C-alpha cells in the first residue's frame, strides 16, 4: 500500500495533477505540449465525454471513426512528462483508493505530437521527424531504478565521447521508441532518426542570449554525429522521459514532431498550426 504522500489524490478521488479519475481516459492517448492544441485536435472528435483541465494539463476524450481517443497536454519539459506518465499509469494500474497495484497491468499507447528544431540541412522546416531513438540530456531516468536494460548504451557512450561530455552534466541516456508504433507509420514520408531531448530551450539547445553556453559548437557536433548509419535530426524537450517511463511501466510510446525551425539555415515557420492539424489528422487515422 502506498503512503498518502506517494500517490496523492484530490477530494473527489481524482489523481493529483491531472484531475482525472479512472475511466476518464482511453487506452490510446495523443500527447501535445500546448493546451491550446488539445482544443484544435479535439475538433476532429465526436461524442466527447470528458473535458477536464488543471494547470497545464488539459484532457479531452472522445471518438474518432469508432475509436475512442484521449488528447492531453503535458506542458513543456521532461519534468512534466514525469508527472503525466506516472499519473496516467496510476489511473489504469493502481487502485487509487487503496494504493495497491492491480494484478493485470494495462498497457497504454502514447503518441506525442510536438514541434522541434532541425539540426541538419536535410531536416528542413515543415518536415516531420519520427523519433526512433530519444537521447536525454535531462537526467530524469537516472532517478529511477532498473532502467539499464532499456537503454542503448553503445549509442549514448559514443555520443558522450564525441561531445567530450563534461562530468558536471547528467550523463546522456538513449531510449528507443516502440517498434510496434514505429511500424504503424512505416509508409509515411517522415524523416526517421535520433532526437535530442534537452532540459531547457536556451543554453541546453545551444542558444546564447545574454548567457553563454558550455559549448558554443555543440549543435555542429550533433549535426555531424553518426552512429551505425543513424543521425541526429532534431531537438525537443520531452521524448527521452516519455520513452523511458513508458518502457519501464509497460506502455508503448512514439514521438512525431513537426520541424518549425532549422538551427542550421535559420529558417522558421511562424504559421505552423495548420501543419500540426494535418499531422494530427494523419495520426488519428492511423492509430
Image: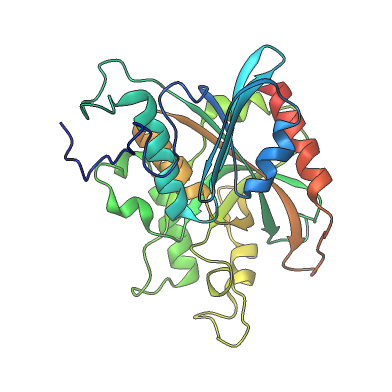
Q: Quadrant of the C terminus?
A: top right
Whether residue 113 is visible? yes
Identified at 60% across, 49% down, the residue is 33
Residue at position x 38%, y 44% from top? 151
Report the residue that reaches farthest toward the front.
Answer: 11
Q: Position of residue 133 (x, y in %)?
A: 53, 44
In the displayed structure, does residue 82 sit left or right of residue 35? left
Query: How is colour applied across the structure in the image?
Result: rainbow
Q: Is residue 249 left or right of residue 53?
A: left
Query: Compared with residue 105, is residue 255 higher up or lower down, i.e. above or below?
Result: below
- Residue 152 seen: no
92 vs 159: above or below: above
**Residue 126, relative to residue 9: is it above or below?**
below
Percent coordinates x, y for residue 158 in the rendering: 45, 59
State the residue lying farthest toward the top: 66
> Which residue is at the far bottom?
210
**Image coords of residue 275 (percent x, y):** 81, 44
Give the quarter of the figure containing the N terminus. Answer: top left
- Percent across and percent down for residue 272 are 80, 52
Q: From the viewer's side, name the closer residue of 262 and 100.
A: 100
Q: Quadrant of residue 277?
A: top right
Q: How many marks?
A: 0
Residue at x-position 76% and y-position 43%:
276
Residue 10's image quarter?
top left
Looking at the image, residue 99 lies above or below residue 84: above
Q: Residue at x 32, y 39 (%)?
A: 149
> Residue 276 or 230: which is nearer the viewer?
276
Amino acid at each position: 500500500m502506498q503512503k498518502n504522500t506517494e500517490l496523492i489524490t484530490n477530494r473527489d478521488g481524482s489523481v493529483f495533477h491531472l484531475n482525472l479519475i479512472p475511466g476518464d481516459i482511453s487506452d490510446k492517448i495523443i500527447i501535445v505540449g500546448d493546451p491550446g492544441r488539445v482544443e484544435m485536435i479535439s475538433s476532429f472528435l465526436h461524442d466527447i465525454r470528458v473535458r477536464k483541465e488543471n494547470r497545464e494539463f488539459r484532457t479531452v476524450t472522445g471518438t474518432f471513426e469508432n475509436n475512442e481517443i484521449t488528447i492531453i497536454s503535458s506542458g513543456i519539459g521532461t519534468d512534466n512528462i514525469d508527472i503525466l506518465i506516472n499519473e496516467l499509469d496510476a489511473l489504469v494500474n493502481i487502485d487509487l483508493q487503496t494504493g495497491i497495484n492491480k494484478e493485470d497491468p494495462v498497457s497504454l499507447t502514447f503518441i506525442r505530437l510536438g514541434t522541434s528544431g532541425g539540426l541538419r540541412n536535410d531536416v528542413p522546416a515543415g518536415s516531420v521527424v519520427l523519433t526512433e531513438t530519444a537521447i536525454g540530456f535531462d537526467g530524469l531516468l537516472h532517478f529511477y531504478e532498473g532502467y539499464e536494460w532499456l537503454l542503448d548504451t553503445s549509442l549514448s557512450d559514443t555520443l558522450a565521447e564525441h561531445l567530450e561530455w563534461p562530468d558536471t552534466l547528467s550523463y546522456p541516456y538513449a531510449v528507443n521508441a516502440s517498434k510496434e508504433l514505429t511500424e504503424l507509420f512505416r509508409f509515411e514520408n517522415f524523416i526517421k532518426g535520433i532526437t535530442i531531448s534537452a532540459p531547457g530551450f536556451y543554453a541546453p539547445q545551444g542558444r546564447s542570449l545574454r548567457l553563454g553556453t558550455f559549448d558554443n559548437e555543440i549543435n555542429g557536433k550533433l549535426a555531424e554525429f553518426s552512429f551505425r548509419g543513424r543521425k541526429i535530426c532534431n531537438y525537443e524537450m520531452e521524448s527521452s522521459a516519455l520513452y523511458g517511463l513508458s518502457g519501464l511501466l509497460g506502455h508503448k510510446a512514439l514521438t512525431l514532431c513537426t520541424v518549425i525551425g532549422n538551427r542550421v539555415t535559420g529558417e522558421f515557420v511562424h504559421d505552423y498550426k495548420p501543419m500540426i492539424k494535418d499531422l494530427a489528422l494523419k495520426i488519428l487515422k492511423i492509430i
